[in-house]
């Protein structure tokens, strides 16, 4: 068996075309969807993420606002800007790129964003709504994973799903989304004993722990669907290339479906951010 690769770039392109159509409908009604992005500091990876998000907006008909602050900016300045954006009816989504410099309380910054404009889905109110099965905004990476599973017609009800990683950004919301689809969910982490025992039971295995190639073929159930959320850069002496949390060479010989890195979940994350922004704008005409 050789796994079929789920092409995140292709699916993302299809979905973005649909988003552009929806944005055009809104513009005909006098509403231009708008995403505001705040970047603090000069972290190269963060700068790339923000640039890609802004480019995604432009290509789908979503207006973008980008505010860039130096790394030593006082938190009160950023919080004041968030308050302005919260009050602006023409702004439908607000995103603060993480991580923030050490003088910031990241939780306080995320909580300052209006829940109605929290298109990352990180505000406590939106986390609670997701827990109750009534999400306003679904965190973008887990949302993208669910769309990938849907696109491949993966049967979720009754499936054994194992998530490796328990972050607030991926692991925990991923568990809630799969549970809502009637999966039996196990969440593993750095202190899980005998990780392979759990992963080998999984019909659906989501790796989101940030350790290069830690999931190997002998840890995967034959025929499993394997979703690789990890993005890691190998050391220079190993080629310096990007790789995921899954050892693709060994796992592709065991799994039925597999997401590649790069070109898998990554493109879907930004697409779902755009989706959340558009959905926020659409609520203005309901």
Image: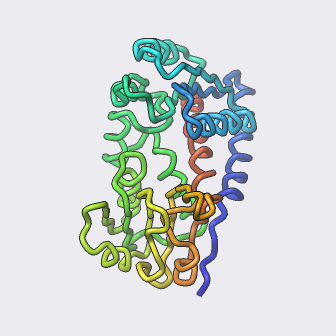
Q: Vertical placement of 184 versus 129: above or below? A: below
Residue at 31% over, 66% down: 186
In the picture provided, is 91 more to the left or to the right than 192? right
Residue 231 pos. (x, y %): 53, 55
User: Which residue appears at 34% of the width and 30% of the height?
Assistant: 107
Colouring method of the image: rainbow
Q: Residue at x 51, y 65 (%)?
A: 227
State which quadrant residue 56 falls in. top right
Residue furthest to the front in view is 237
Image quarter in which the N terminus is found = bottom right
Q: Position of residue 190 (x, y in %)?
A: 30, 60
Q: How many marks?
A: 0
* Frontmost residue, 44 versus 178: 44
Report if residue 102 is visible in the image.
Answer: yes
The quadrant in which residue 11 appears is bottom right
Where does the image place residue 71, in percent across and percent down from the top left? 49, 22
Q: Name the residue rendered at 44%, 79% in the picture.
A: 220
In this orientation, does residue 284 appear? no
Closer to the camera in the image, 284 or 166: 166
Query: Is 195 above or below relative to 84?
Result: below
Which residue is at the far bottom? 1
Q: Picture coordinates of residue 276 (x, y %)?
A: 55, 39
């Amino acid at each position: 068996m050789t796994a079929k690769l789920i092409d995140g770039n292709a699916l993302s392109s299809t979905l973005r075309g649909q988003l552009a159509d929806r944005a055009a409908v809104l513009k005909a009604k006098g509403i231009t969807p708008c995403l505001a992005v705040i970047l603090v500091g000069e972290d190269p990876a963060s700068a790339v993420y923000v640039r890609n998000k802004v480019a995604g907006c432009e290509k789908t008909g979503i207006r973008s606002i980008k505010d860039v602050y130096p790394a030593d900016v006082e938190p009160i300045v950023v919080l004041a800007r968030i308050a302005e954006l919260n009050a602006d009816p023409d702004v439908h989504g607000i995103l603060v790129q993480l991580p923030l410099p050490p003088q910031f309380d990241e939780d306080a910054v995320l909580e300052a964003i209006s829940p109605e404009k929290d298109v990352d889905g990180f505000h406590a109110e939106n986390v609670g709504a997701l827990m109750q099965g009534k999400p306003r905004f679904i965190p973008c990476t887990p949302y993208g994973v669910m769309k990938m599973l849907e696109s491949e017609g993966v049967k979720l009800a009754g499936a054994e799903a194992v998530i490796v990683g328990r972050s607030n950004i991926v692991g925990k919301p991923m568990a809630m989304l799969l549970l809502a689809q009637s999966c039996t969910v196990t969440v593993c982490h750095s202190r899980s004993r005998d990780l392979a025992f759990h992963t080998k039971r999984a019909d659906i295995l989501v790796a989101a722990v940030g350790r290069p190639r830690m999931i190997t073929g002998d840890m995967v159930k034959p025929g499993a669907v394997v979703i690789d959320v990890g993005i890691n850069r190998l050391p220079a002496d190993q080629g310096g290339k990007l790789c995921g949390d899954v050892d693709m060479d060994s796992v592709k010989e065991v799994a039925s479906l597999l997401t590649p890195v790069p070109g898998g979940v990554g493109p879907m994350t930004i697409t779902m951010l755009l989706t959340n922004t558009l959905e926020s704008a659409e609520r203005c005409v309901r």
